[in-house]
Amino acid sequence: MYIYDEIDQQLIDDRVRQFRDQTNRYLAGELSEDDFRPLRLQNGLYVQRHAPMLRVAVPYGVLNSKQVRKLAHIARTYDRGYGHFTTRQNIQYNWPDLAKVPDILEELATVQMHAIQTSGNCVRNFTADQFAGVAADEVIDPRPYAEIMRQWFTFHPEFAYLPRKFKMALSGSTGDRAAIYVHDIGVQLYPAADGTVLADVIVGGGLGRTPIVGSVIKKGLPWFDLLTYCDAVLRVYNRFGRRDNKYKARIKILVKALGPDTFGDMVDEEWKYLKDGPGRIPQAEFDRVNAHFQPKPYESFAGNDASFEAKKAENPAFARWVSRNVHPHKRAGYSAITFSLKGLGFAPGDITDAQLDKVADLADQYSFGEIRVSHEQNLILTDVKQSDLFALWEAAKELKLANPNIGLLTNMIACPGGDFCALANAKSIPIAEGIAQRFEDLDYLFDIGELDLNISGCMNSCGHHHIGHIGILGVDKNGSEWYQISLGGNQGMSAKGTPTSLGKVIGPSFAQDEVPAVIEKIIQTYLALRQDDERFIDSVQRLGIEPFKERVYAKAN
Amino acid sequence: MPKLIKNGQVLDDTSVILTDSEGNEVHEDGDAIVPLACWLEERHLLKERHTSVGVLLEGDAEPAELKDDLDFLKLIVINFPSFVDGRGYSIARLLRERYGFKGELRAVGDIQRDQLYYLARCGFDSFVIPDGKDADAALASFNDFSDSYQATVDRPVPLFSRRRNQSAN
Ligand code: HEM
Ligand code: SF4
């Protein structure tokens, strides 16, 4: 992973000092609430239901064990012993004391971490494929590009006060695991015939109140133009994006109003003046950054490990875990594994300080000390020898992180909802819990097969409900909490070639205690109507939502 | 009286912003500032009668409209109706980097000390600190950061190119 040099370190130290001063001025009454708000937000500090909430950046989801131990320490010392991983690959703390936040930032800075631009109307944390660098279907490793872009947009003086927040994601695989079509800017990297790296740039996607699938506005952009081109996009947005209405302020609204072609022309006009300027990425810089992302010192294996195959044959529970939580790797004899942060008794994405410490130990022992965060709110070890998988599985079981549900219905994405979030219309966590209970039976879960279920507590869509195969949205009806169900959303190009799509609402919403049964009916409809080994999403796309709607509302009436 | 920070010094801001579109009221001492629309209408008259006129731009202004006047103008003022309205940063860079404006570029309006570092990097070199804010204390904010990653007006060579030169030595 990228290791800071002295200047990178100096900059985050500068930031800690700056934020300590801002916090002191606020606490001393020299800085008003209104003036402090944008400043604290650009440091990931929200004021929430119970306490401030601090969102710590995990750039493109990559962590080392030392950092994870620090996150555990912060959970223990400054919070209530746990943290919450988010769909933007970050971690949130729900109970810090505002006056202590500068101390937390100072501790984070000692392990090259920070909360810079994790919220506010500025360029947010870059997200990327959680299997970057190791995925079997990867064509270009997005990490060095993400790191170069991360640096460029950190403290970017022109774009700190945008009309609205700005999110970018990168993918370099044939399967899109970074949801690049629902970001303000999505970048798809691929090699040209001559081996040079090109990018397709997707602009104007997003969820929230107005969900939109982004448009490709630039095809085949040379990699060294990524910064100048994104600067041009951001400048057009900064100047012409709407500022009169916060619900219409995202770049997607501007792109939609102008049309992607016109918007693309405006960007090209702007880019003309920037492309050959100082922002063009020098090869030497790419090489410097890329040196941090070299393949690990792998051992050589001819093929699959024999003991691994034998263990699978003799232990069905292990085989089941392997089938869901172990992922193909570029290197023979290696795999990536997912620790599931989804199970009964805790909120999706939650993890305790003790678990974090143990995950760090396991990463040191089995995976070169590196840990990834997925936008599905799970943790990943990317470089595990197949001969170690059994031992790792047993350790994960002890930690209660071995739920074999990756890609299945209970691997739900859920936002913190009404239990923590001041913006919520409804709770998310009890809904997730109710569904997890209903679908506890593993055989049933495996029979249902691949399915993304996403839950948001309000229209802001932090839980990505629009792009869940099944989406659940908390809505407010006369002051009480209801849930709207949508079907047919899809987060990104899968190996099976299903493009990004937005779910369709099936009809009137439901009370909290009805939701698990409604999901059950949807699943039964699917099981009755599916053809061969058709996945849920493919059945919904073939059949439309009508048959599901009929079954769900038939009994309710 | 609001304070003006210029060349690292805190001064009283005595400038007058005229909103009269006739442009006739401009003081002979050259301290007056006229809105862009007034400048565009009365440009010839103003040029004839005054050696120094400032033009005031709002966030929705198109800086290209001043392209041909930049040699004459010694002062361009950009207004920030709210400190979270960041359009002025882009306009400043366009004036400096694309159109080559060399005169004084001033930020007025809702200017907080916590924006000064970024404003300076986008090419502003004077700042009107609103009444009631401590302009002397604000001076410290110009040193919020010791370096920066991007190519900007005040430091046109981005960090990656400076790093490269270092390692080449
Ligand atoms: C508890 C505090 C939180 C607050 C106050 C909050 C606030 C918001 C708001 C206001 C939006 C709407 C943005 C828009 O205008 O489109 C939003 C969207 C979003 N938030 Fe959060 N959020 C919170 C927690 C989270 C968490 C926990 C996650 C990850 C699990 C998250 C990730 C996202 C994502 C992915 C979106 C959709 C982005 C898009 O429009 O493309 N947020 N959030
Ligand atoms: S979707 Fe709504 S309820 Fe959930 S975290 Fe986001 S803002 Fe809060």
Image: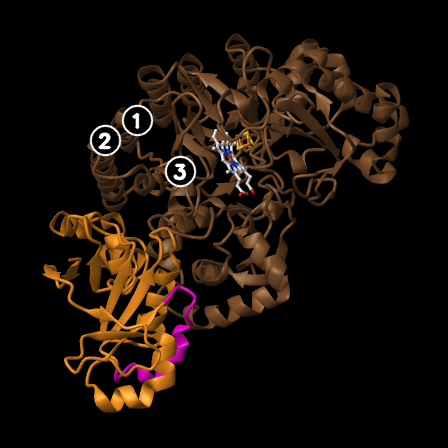
Chain letter for the residue marked with disc 2 in the picture: A
Query: Who is closer to the viewer here, B60 or A438?
Result: B60
Q: What is the three-letter code of the residue carrying label 2?
A: Leu
- Provide the residue designation for mark 2: A27
Q: Colour of chain B?
A: orange
Give the label on residue A98, or none: 1
Q: Colour of chain A?
A: brown
Mark in the foreground, 3 or 2: 2
Mark in the foreground, 1 or 3: 1
Rounded to the nearest whole Å, what is the CA distance between mark 1 and mark 3?
31 Å
User: Vertically, is A376 above or below B58?
Assistant: above
Q: What is the three-letter code of the residue carrying label 3?
A: Met
Q: Is residue A396 left or right of residue B69?
A: right
User: Does the numbered disc 2 mark a residue whose Cβ is under 8 Å from ligand 1?
Assistant: no
Rounded to the nearest whole Å, what is the CA distance between mark 1 and mark 2?
9 Å
Q: Secondary structure at mark 1?
A: helix
Tags 3 and 2 on a common chain: yes
Residue under the point 57% across and 65% down: A264
Part of the protein shown in magenta: B58-72
Which is more N-terminal, label 2 or label 1? Answer: 2
Q: Residues within 10 Å of mark 1 (few under 14, many from 20)?
A: some
* Residue A402 picture quarter: top right
Quadrant where the N terminus of chain A is found in the figure: top left
In the rendered image, residue A221, in percent from the top left (x then y), is placed at 54, 62
Q: Is residue A533 left or right of residue B164?
A: right
